[in-house]
Amino acid sequence: MMELATLSDVQSSKFLNLRDAMASLALVVVTLSIVRFVSLRHLSCRSLSLSPLAPPGPPGLPLIGNVFDIPLERSWVTYRELAKTYGDVIGVKALGQTLIVLNSLTVTIDLLEKRSAIYSDRPVSVVSQLIGWTRNLAFKEYGNDWRAMRRMLWQHLQPGIVAKYQPVQRRGTTILLKHLSKDSSNLDEKIKSAYCKILLNVMYGLHFDHVDIPRYIEVLSCLESAIAEAFQPGAFLVEFIPWLQYIPAWLPDAGWQQKVLKWRRLLDALVDGPYNAAKEAMRCGDADRSMLSEAIESTRRGDDSHNVGDSDKLIKETASSAFHAGADALAATLHAFICAMVLNPEVQVVAQEELDRVVGRARLPEHSDRPSLPYVEAILKETYRWYNPVPLGVAHRCTEDNVYREWKIPKGATIMFNIWSIFHDAHVYPKPDAFCPERYLKDGKLNTDILQPEILAFGMGRRTCPGKHFADDSLFISIASILHVFNITKALDAQGAPIPVKSEAASGFLSVIQKFDCSLQPRSSAHAALVQEA
């Protein structure tokens, strides 16, 4: 007869069964957890391996990133050296802000041209806003005002229209020739004066002898050094720590605010001065036809969508933008051309032979001679390549997160394209440090197979300079005329020895070839007479 189990036996048996069940359940849970962890780990690693990475660059420090890696001196050279290690797209981060530098033509076209819809904005710069440089078309954020200003300039400076300004360009060039024939000292001042007069006439209708022109030239020269400093990446800590702008200027280490205030007053004078002078000259009937007068008439007729008050503001800022950017860039480029001629006298000889053959010695060159002067044209192209006044371009800003190759480029990233690096790429331009116009010629004609430097020299994408055709015409007639009239050589010291000339450009956003001594002497009495009789 089977024994009946006691209550304690039953309870003990149930406890053992429950304990075994719990242990089994725990084992299953642990096993599933391990499997889940391993699976998630695998998927996470796979996801990370497939997700886009930040563009490569030098390793940064905790919190501050690459603050100490952003070069302040000749940064375009440093970025080219970094490209040898990290590739043609370099990324650096400083205090949460991303800077990406493009060092090849391919990546520059891929982003700034092909993706221009999201790469045409400008970075929001605290210093730029405090100074008021956002009134300038070159630095204005991408938007309706920018479109209106650019359209206004394009209406007056597009290829089919700029020819009407050629008489003014020739007149300004003739004045420059007269000044240079008397004395080649203060070369940069003479060049800037000539281009300022041309631009003030074309943009504002002011006569070449207007009483205020010397003052505008002085203000422009002061702003040249200001812009070189203000737009140098890393130059002002307030760009990384914006709340510093609210610190009182009288506190220690807040002296930068006094500097910014001084620059703002200079810029106000440049924006308002010529505009007010032109309005007064127009009222008195003493102004030439100009972009300003035509734009104002168009506004009064209601040809644009802005109200009169907004239009007047945009017209004033547009004219100022063209005057400011044009005078600086034209003067810096012609200054570089003369430096190149001092260092390469053999280039002058070939150009002068071409000019004598085409133009002769009885007149000065004209714009209509241009198709027959391929070597002079090649000199202009090589000047664009050999020297660019803004070697890192004007910074762009990305307005959307996007992926390029295997890299993620975040919204708000600042994009700079290293024009200098591209123009000194030996794969594109053999012997890039040499000044060689022949690289653009083939069988005595212009060679279109080589990269034409003006494609990059005037900016990229939707931010291409709208005044590039006007600038190109101005520089061509200046270069052709100077080569036709003068022999450009090194100046001599008191002992009659040539004074060395170096093609060194200053650091900064606007990089101008440093001052040098040279001599410009008429090629003959006949050439001297051409200038005096012009």
Image: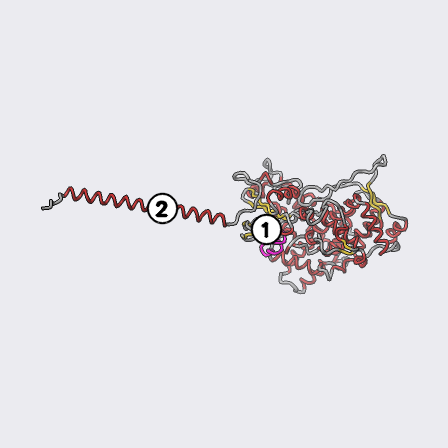
Name the residue nearer the viewer: 443 or 89.
443
Looking at the picture, how far across and down is residue 92, in whole percent?
57, 43
How many neighbours does mark 2 have within 10 angstroms: few (below 14), some (14-19), or many (20 or more)?
few
Looking at the picture, how far across and down is residue 403, in whole percent?
54, 52
Q: CA distance from mark 2 to mark 1?
A: 46 Å
Looking at the picture, how far across and down is residue 498, in whole percent?
82, 38
Is 142 rendered above or below residue 28? below
**Residue ranking furthest to the left:** 1
Circle 1: element type: strand
Q: Can residue 51 be found in the magenta stretch? A: no
Looking at the picture, how far across and down is residue 298, in whole percent?
68, 63
Report which quarter residue 158 is drawn in: bottom right
Q: Can residue 115 be found in the magenta stretch? A: yes
How many neighbours does mark 1 have within 10 angstroms: few (below 14), some (14-19), or many (20 or more)?
many
Amino acid type at circle 2 is Ser
**Residue ranking furthest to the front:** 1
Name the residue nearer the viewer: 303 or 15.
15
Whether pointer 2 and pointer 1 mark residues with C-beta atoms closer than 8 Å, the reply is no
According to the picture, the residue beneath numbered tag 2 turns out to be 33
According to the picture, the residue beneath numbered tag 1 turns out to be 397
Report which quarter residue 30 is drawn in: top left
**Main SS class of the magenta portion in the image:** loop
Residue 256: in sight, yes or no? Answer: yes
The residue segment tinted magenta is 108-124
Q: Nearer the viewer, mark 2 or mark 1?
A: 2
Amino acid type at circle 1 is Arg
